[in-house]
Amino acid sequence: MADKVLMKGNEAIAEAAIHAGCRHYFGYPITPQTEVAAYMAKVMPKIGGTFLQAESEIAAINMVYGVASCGLRVMTSSSSPGISLKGEGLSYLAGSDLPALVVNVQRGGPGLGGIQPSQSDYFQATRGGGHGDYHMIVLAPSSVQEMAELTVKGFELADKYRMTAMILADGTMGQMMEPVSLDFELEPVPEKPWATTGTKMAREHNIVNSLYLKPDELEKGNFDRYERYKIVEANETRYEEYLTNDADIVIAAFGIAARVSRNAVNEARRLGIKVGMIRPITLWPFPKAPFEKAAEHAKAFISVELSMGQMIEDVELATKCRVPVSLCNRAGGMIPSPAQVLDCIKKIANGGNN
Amino acid sequence: MSTKQFLLSGFGGQGILFAGKLLAYKGLNAGKNVSWLPSYGPEMRGGTASCSVIISDEPVGSPIVSEPDILVAMNLPSLDRFESSVVPGGIIFADSTLIERKVQRTDVTTYYVPATKLASDNKTPTLANMILMGKILKVLGDFDDDSVTAALSKVISAKHADMLEVNKKAMQLGADYE
């Protein structure tokens, strides 16, 4: 195995994207994801790639649309307010069935908010982010190694299903350094016969478009897309379970919240409380199965989030509200401490509600 | 199981983040799990910069150090802010050139190193951080030439390779300080 190096999460995303064959990056600076763009600015010119600081987030996402139409791996990155600006472009990418990678290193909101870590774009990400019926594949890394691995996986899934994949990280994940190895295999890039690569007078024109004025055609596009989403749900759901087998209390947490919760779970176990954790790695598709299974023996769920409670709704849907789900949270750029999560666990263990 | 949680804090520009990276690489080279998390934001310019480093035999959970085993305070605001958060039995390293008061806690071990003065006496005024690092590694029983050189060569970029020796010298100065 190659030597591990210390990298910031944001740098790991950039390096992994290059590793995955991405040679086109368009962005606009915003804390706390600027290192992605900085890394691309440094490396892309040396390897014949494109780094372009666009005039705005909206311009950047539409440049992504252009390169994606040509069938090439392309990405943009931003943080929460910038992702809102990209919302229109995300919808157009979906309407045109284009593969692309979009990174959101979340910060506190709403509005311009602050620059500290947050998970409050969960609804926006898992429900598509723009107008119309569509989904993105949403990947939630919980370590710098996963920032790298899921970036590569994001490109692969995007190509495979002609969808946008989003890395939904947060300021902590972007700024922290951990050992990372980029020594992993790539899947072959699928053929893209739909790409606008020039007909060379040898085939019909390929047209990439999201405008369908005939409603029956537009409806068919929607139904076809949702058939594809079913396959994604069946094949691409990812999660990690930690000590859930005998758990009376099950924590749901992703990203940095899962890191904090892991400390609390370990401490609670030392105190004899049977608690475990399900960590969704794909937020869409949401890993319903482990929650359904855990609901058979667990007495309570706790959703630990850096938001006012967004994923909690998916936990309630997955468990069909058979078991009470409570919220343990901070918001606006604050991060719950392991002690806070432990208190939430203790309260539930003692028969109370949070 | 052994886990060491470090919190390093000082003015922006004192090399807090760099010192943290050295610790992290030293842990990584020794086969440990490590994490390094900076404070980031508007407070970085001229204000307080801090950095959480965790070195552990176990996978690192939360990378945020709120109760450090080891606090490195390079200025008074840092000591004022974090003194009470150190775990009982923990260690505080203070730059006594910039921190005139004594540590109030009686349940921690404190080492006062006039790192800023030593650095300027040594004509390396920017290396107070490395002098402290030398002392810290010495106290932790982790100061040896090979591992220090290996870690330094990771954190000092190839472009600045000529800085390796002065950094090592500064660390030796700290390690030798009684």
Image (tube, rainbow, N blue to C red):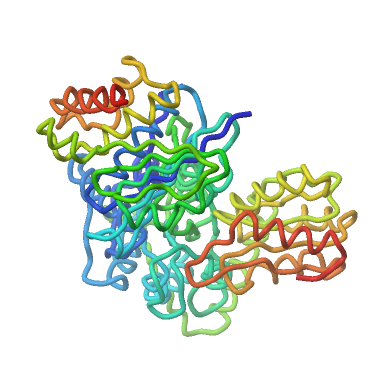
Left or right, residue A239 beside residue B51: right
Q: Position of residue B58 (x, y in %)?
A: 60, 32
Can residue A188 be seen here? The reply is no
Q: Position of residue B55 (x, y in %)?
A: 50, 34
Left or right, residue A63 beside residue B102: left
| Residue at 37% from the left image edge and 38% from the top image edge | A19
Q: Position of residue A7 (x, y in %)?
A: 37, 40
Looking at the image, which residue sits at the far left?
A: B123
| Residue at 33% from the left image edge and 32% from the top image edge | B133
Q: Position of residue A307 (x, y in %)?
A: 57, 70
Residue A297, image quadrant:
bottom right
Left or right, residue B44 beside residue A234: left
All told, the count of numbered labels is: 0
Above or below, comparing residue A194 to residue A135 in the picture: above
Closer-to-camera residue (A159/B100): B100
Left or right, residue A149 beside residue A283: left
Can residue A96 be seen here? The reply is yes
Residue B138, image quadrant:
top left
Closer-to-camera residue (B146/B72): B72
Closer-to-camera residue (B69/A123): B69
Residue A98, image quadrant:
bottom left
Above or below, comparing residue A137 to residue B121 in the picture: below
